């Protein structure tokens, strides 16, 4: 991935595979979504994911798929936690187990516009990702996170 062309070429190659060999292997009732090199595949529960993964991995030895199955009707994808409810999917912000609150401390020497943009960015991410029922909980996590970093109340609001 050293060349500036590596990323676009890799994406183009995957698009070729998705239009041809992958399309022929993936069941039609599955939903296939990809962001760069992360793939979300939503299939009926009867689908044999292990067998499907083996077939996909035979196409190109340099592109190997692994999979995670949902736990407690929930699955992380990028920074989104997708939860399967009886009638719908709900979404919330996902933080890896190794997540640390290593953000800009309020008393650092960064310009106040940088600090303000950081706070705004976290709230915008919550608005873009979270289902309405998960939004208040995410707001509380953001508030607590920035309070621990000694941000003043008016900065957080």
Image (cartoon, rainbow, N blue to C red):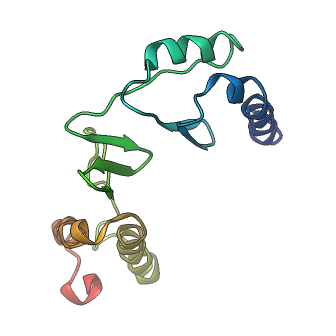
Q: Which residue is rendered at x = 27% and y = 42% of the image?
A: 74
Foreground pick, 152 / 48: 48
Quadrant the N terminus occupies? top right
Instruction: Please indicate whether residue 153 sits to the left or right of residue 43 in the image.
Output: left
Image coordinates of residue 68 in percent, x first then y, are: 38, 27
Quadrant the C terminus occupies? bottom left
Q: Which residue is rendered at x = 19% and y = 65% of the image?
A: 141
The quarter of the picture where residue 33 lies is top right
Is 150 above or below relative to 37? below
**Residue reaching furthest to the bottom:** 154
| Total numbered circles | 0
Is 23 above or below relative to 88? above
The quarter of the picture where residue 24 lies is top right
The quarter of the picture where residue 121 lies is bottom left
Image coordinates of residue 119 in percent, x first then y, are: 35, 74
Instruction: Please indicate whether residue 2 sits to the left or right of residue 46 in the image.
Output: right
Is 99 above or below relative to 61? below
Image coordinates of residue 5 in percent, x first then y, are: 83, 40
Foreground pick, 92 / 111: 92
Is 152 above or below relative to 60? below
Q: Which residue is rendered at x = 27% and y = 38% of the image?
A: 98
Foreground pick, 54 / 104: 54
Q: Which residue is rendered at x = 35% and y = 74% of the image?
A: 123
Instruction: Please indicate whether residue 71 sits to the left or right of residue 78 in the image.
Output: left
Image coordinates of residue 66 in percent, x first then y, are: 48, 21
Foreground pick, 138 / 117: 138
């Amino acid at each position: 991935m050293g060349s500036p062309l590596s990323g676009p070429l890799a994406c183009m190659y995957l698009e070729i595979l998705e239009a041809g060999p992958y399309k022929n292997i993936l069941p039609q009732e599955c939903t296939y979504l990809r962001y760069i090199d992360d793939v979300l595949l939503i299939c009926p529960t009867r689908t044999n994911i292990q067998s499907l993964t083996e077939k996909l991995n035979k196409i190109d030895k340099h592109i190997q798929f692994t999979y995670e199955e949902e736990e407690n009707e929930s699955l992380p994808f990028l920074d989104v936690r997708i939860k399967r409810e009886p009638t719908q999917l709900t979404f919330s912000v996902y933080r890896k187990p190794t997540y640390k609150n290593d953000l800009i401390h309020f008393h650092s020497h960064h310009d106040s516009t940088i600090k303000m943009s950081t706070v705004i960015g976290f709230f915008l991410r919550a608005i873009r990702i979270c289902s309405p029922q998960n939004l208040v909980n995410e707001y509380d996590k953001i508030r607590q996170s920035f309070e621990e970093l000694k941000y003043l109340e008016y900065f957080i609001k």
